[in-house]
Image (cartoon, rainbow, N blue to C red):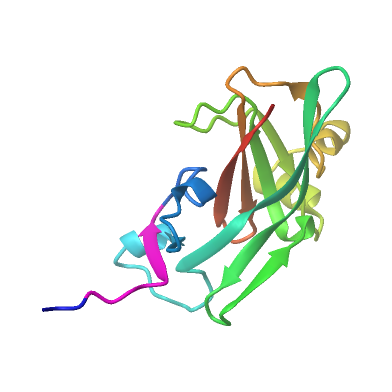
Amino acid sequence: MRRIPKFDMLIVMGFAFEGYTADEETRMGPLTILPVKMSPELMVRELKNTGEGNLFMVFGEPDVEIETHQDDTVSVKLLGVDVYDPRKGIIHSDTPKDIACWFIDTAYNGEAFFVRHAYFTGEDEPYKQLQRALNSEIDAEAWEALYRTESLPFAKPESGKIAVKVINHYGDEVMKEYKIL
């Protein structure tokens, strides 16, 4: 009789994951399921590995606080995101200064993410970097409305769910679905 070994972890690799992928509901008993995002660069054979990028990235999830206001609106505050560094084998928490941008789908349907709120964070003068990248002037007042870690208030979603997507400076992204009651 052949014995089947017990495993502590199942690693699932993919180029993108839905927001519910790492939720507790998708766990299988005591088996930990770890989604690992593969860089799209792996699909291009001609690219040389310089060792500078992240070919595999394991994120935790966005660290957010969701606040319901007296007028029945909701706002989201970005606190950071957990990141697994496979080179060092450790998990560290990135703060908003380490995050390039974050988005909210305020009416998430569980199937497709639509950017309904977009915000930018980070250090090293991202305003000037964006101006250079776009090669144009950006309204400073408009930029201040988007350069923030707390969202503008929005109506509670009819779907009862929102999703938050966070992208770091390397282009690695993670998304998580949240229930709004």
Residue 3 sits above or below residue 24 on the image: below
Q: Tell me the residue at 57%/21% (across/down).
A: 159
Residue 158 sits above or below residue 142 on the image: above
Q: Position of residue 146 (x, y in %)?
A: 79, 37
Q: Quadrant of residue 91?
A: bottom right
Is 7 included in the stretch rendered in magenta?
Answer: yes
Drawn side of residue 50 relative to residue 93, left or right: left
Is 53 included in the stretch rendered in magenta?
Answer: no
Furthest residue toward left? 1
Q: Quadrant of residue 160?
A: top right
Q: Position of residue 165 (x, y in %)?
A: 61, 44
Q: Position of residue 93 (x, y in %)?
A: 71, 65
Residue 2 sits above or below residue 82 on the image: below
Drawn side of residue 31 relative to residue 89, left or right: left
Please say whether residue 29 is visible from this viewpoint: yes
Please say whether residue 23 is visible from this viewpoint: no
Residue 30 sits above or below residue 18 on the image: below
Q: Tell me the residue at 73%/40% (across/down).
A: 119
Drawn side of residue 2 relative to residue 168, left or right: left
Between residue 112 and residue 180, name the one nearer to us: 180
Quarter of the picture holding the N terminus: bottom left
Furthest residue toward bottom? 88
Q: Position of residue 9 (x, y in %)?
A: 42, 69
Quarter of the picture holding the C terminus: top right
* Magenta-colored span: 4-15
Q: Tell me the residue at 61%/17% (across/down).
A: 158
